Image: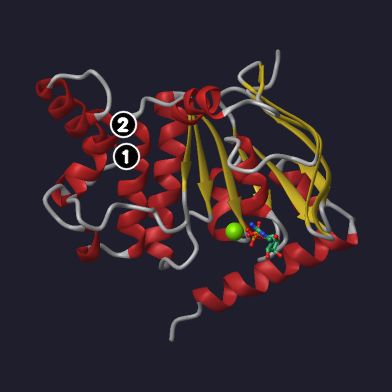
């Protein structure tokens, strides 16, 4: 079966700084694929390529059977509806309430007010944030903003969601809530998902079917979580060990 998202030998440099140096992988329909790597390695750059916000210097990107590598904005708009990117910041509109933020993508479509009401309520319920509907983004914690951003992404009825560092800068309890939401999107809605994170124990381990580790522009690992923990590759072992130490430190009561 064809992949839902596929990268074939993707290269990307900014001036002479090579960020992606031949990245290839595939994400199956309905699976959650995590891309791991330390800060600054190129995870966000990779993720933004999936929806054509950046173009590769070389290589090809296929989404839902369509080669989007050289696609123009009009075609990309369709891809960006189908594949929703949830930014680390949540990127909510500060002057709109939670309800209005989720309704926003729908107001540009041909839905009636009644249909919009119904859809927003449904997304609020799915993401379990009904109580927040009337609040403004400034009244929300970072974690809550991310949950609302997921609800807004769902409003477009996507087939895939991409999450950039979903658990970064949120406390362990809220991380659990976000991880559960990501799992729920896969199980209940059958969505294809990509998660980029530097966090194994608090994130990738909880949500991913497959993981890959980005290092110096290439994947040094691509496999299951068990295979990651069992890997003999020195870069993988070091990354896993650093994660374990960080996880145990965070778990220590203060
Ligand atoms: N638009 C850009 N112009 C120049 N350099 C960029 C741009 N976007 C990202 N970079 C560089 O690419 C590298 C990878 O960035 P990024 O993907 O944000 O890392 P990560 O998300 O893994 O922390 C960084 O060195 C960053 O400075
Ligand atoms: Mg990033």
Q: Name the quarter where the N terminus is drawn.
A: top right
- In the structure shown, which secondary structural element does the residue marked by tag 1 occupy? helix
Residue 13 coordinates in the image, percent (x, y): 79, 53
The answer to which image quadrant residue 68 occupies is top right
Q: Is residue 222 above or below residue 135?
A: above
Q: Are marks 1 and 2 in contact (CB under 8 Å)?
A: yes
Left or right: 49 with respect to 228? left
- In the structure shown, which secondary structural element does the residue marked by tag 2 occupy? helix
Front one among 171 and 26: 26
Observer able to see residue 34: no
Q: Is residue 112 above or below residue 93?
A: above
Q: Which residue in the structure is indicated by mark 1?
A: 152
Instruction: Identify the image's colour scheme: rainbow, by chain, secondary structure or one colour.
Output: secondary structure
Observer able to see residue 126: yes
Say which residue appears at 34% left-offset and 49% top-offset. 147
The answer to which image quadrant residue 125 occupies is top left
Q: Which residue in the structure is indicated by mark 2?
A: 155
Residue 80 coordinates in the image, percent (x, y): 49, 31
Determine crowd level at label 2: few under 14, some 14-19, many 20+ residues with C-alpha closer than 10 A. many
Say which residue appears at 67% left-offset and 46% top-offset. 46
Front one among 184 and 141: 141
């Amino acid at each position: 079966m064809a992949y839902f998202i596929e990268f074939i030998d993707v290269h990307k440099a900014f001036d002479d700084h090579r960020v992606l140096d031949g990245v290839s992988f595939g994400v199956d329909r309905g699976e959650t694929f995590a891309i791991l790597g330390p800060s600054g390695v190129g995870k966000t750059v990779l993720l933004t390529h999936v929806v054509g916000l950046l173009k590769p210097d070389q290589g090809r990107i296929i989404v839902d059977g369509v080669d989007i590598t050289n696609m123009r904005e009009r075609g990309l708009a369709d891809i960006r509806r189908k594949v929703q990117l949830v930014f680390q910041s949540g990127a909510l509109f500060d002057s709109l309430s939670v309800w209005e933020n989720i309704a926003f993508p729908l107001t540009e479509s041909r839905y009636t007010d009644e249909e919009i009401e119904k859809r927003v309520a449904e997304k609020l319920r799915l993401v379990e944030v009904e109580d927040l509907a009337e609040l403004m983004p400034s009244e929300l914690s970072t974690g809550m903003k991310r949950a609302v951003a997921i609800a807004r992404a769902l409003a477009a009825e996507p087939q895939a969601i991409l999450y950039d560092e979903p658990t970064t800068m949120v406390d362990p309890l809220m991380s659990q809530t976000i991880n559960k939401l990501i799992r729920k999107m896969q199980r209940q809605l059958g969505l294809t998902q990509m998660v980029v994170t530097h966090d194994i124990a608090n994130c990738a381990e909880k949500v991913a079917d497959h993981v890959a580790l980005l290092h110096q522009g290439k994947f040094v690992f691509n496999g299951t979580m068990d295979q990651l923990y069992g890997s003999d590759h020195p870069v993988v072992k070091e990354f896993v060990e650093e994660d374990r130490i960080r996880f145990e430190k965070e778990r220590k009561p203060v």
